[in-house]
Amino acid sequence: MPLIYCVEDDENIRELVGYALRSQDFEVETFADSKEFWPALEKRTPALFLLDIMLPGESGAALARQYAGAGAQLGLLARGGEALDQLIASLPRPELHRAYAVDVCDHAALQRAAHDFIATAGGIDVVIASAGVSVGTLTEHAQDLSVFEQVMAINVTATVATFAPFIAAMKSQGSGRLVGIGSVAGIRGLPGAEAYSASKAAVISYCESLRLELKPAGIKVVTITPGYIDTPMTRHNAYRMPFLMPAEQFAVRAARAIADGDSYRVIPWQMGVVAKLLRALPNAVYDRAFANAPHKARN
């Protein structure tokens, strides 16, 4: 029976991983910290380590830097025109790139920006719909309904509106990649994150449907499902974030997955293991592990 060591100081995650692996006939030992871990390692060497990596450390900007460094011509879109200009000025060959100060909920403006970039670049290789918002919501509060609508509009509908203007050009080319950003929070619902979990579950299923629809046309649809990435959106979280990954490191791995045309990739890989375990857990076990999980702050 293979032995697995899991070092994770979050008790809920530690219990979850241990239970799920043991149910698959693995021998598992879990440790809250390195003080517990090192003595055990001296006695037995496991077949696999699962380690919580907390590294000090923005994901759309990081991806832009990654692609610009590889020589790509970029069309970058965000609400803040000044921030976009500053980002482009920091990239290699800034004169090559285009900035579009557009709200992703303004679908007509999105379409105009897409057509302008296709005309400028002469084609399109990769479209990444990375706009997103994450806030806590509770259904019992009537005032949260408008927040729920906003989260769905930005995280789901804007993804559709971002992809739509590029599909005809990609079909004409017979190639292209559309990249949607899901979240591990879309795999199982989290307490206090009703809108966010629902929106990311929708993105994951939407991208799967789109992948099947566009495959005959030679267009690949890639779903990137991040765990916790060190970005401005996550830095205000008051709770601990297992396997937190620096944005630049995430960008390298995401770009590799996009280049490979992966249909679905969880980053970092440790969260991929957790995601598979979460899917397999019976509801009763999942409820016991996560019923008291920290809530994201409501606006």
Image: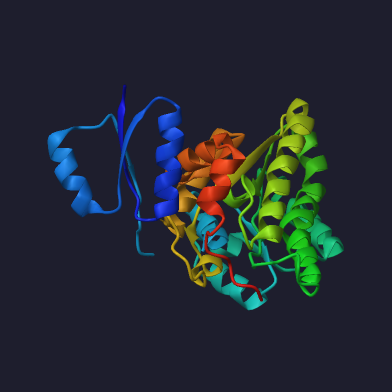
**Vertical placement of residue 235 versus 170, above or below:** below
Q: Residue 113 location, x and y as percent? A: 77, 60
Instruction: Say which of 247 and 281 sits in front.
Output: 281
Left/right placement of residue 72 relative to residue 220 reads left
Instruction: Say which of 244 and 223 sits in front.
Output: 244
Q: Residue furthest right?
A: 108
Instruction: Count every numbered label the image shows and give the total.
Output: 0
**Vertical placement of residue 109 versus 223, above or below:** below
Q: Residue 83 location, x and y as percent? A: 59, 74
Picture quarter with the N terminus:
top left
Residue 100, by quadrant, is bottom right
Mark yes or no: residue 6 visible.
yes
Instruction: Say which of 59 and 245 sits in front.
Output: 245
Q: Residue 134 location, x and y as percent? A: 63, 64
Which residue is painted at 71% across and 66% down in the image? 138
Which residue is painted at 49% across and 52% down in the image? 251
Name the colour scheme: rainbow
**Vertical placement of residue 297 versus 104, above or below:** below
Mark yes or no: residue 67 visible.
no
Picture quarter with the C terminus:
bottom right
Residue 195, by quadrant, is bottom right
Q: Residue 29 location, x and y as percent? A: 30, 38
Which residue is painted at 64% across and 67% down in the image? 136
Instruction: Say which of 139 and 227 sits in front.
Output: 139
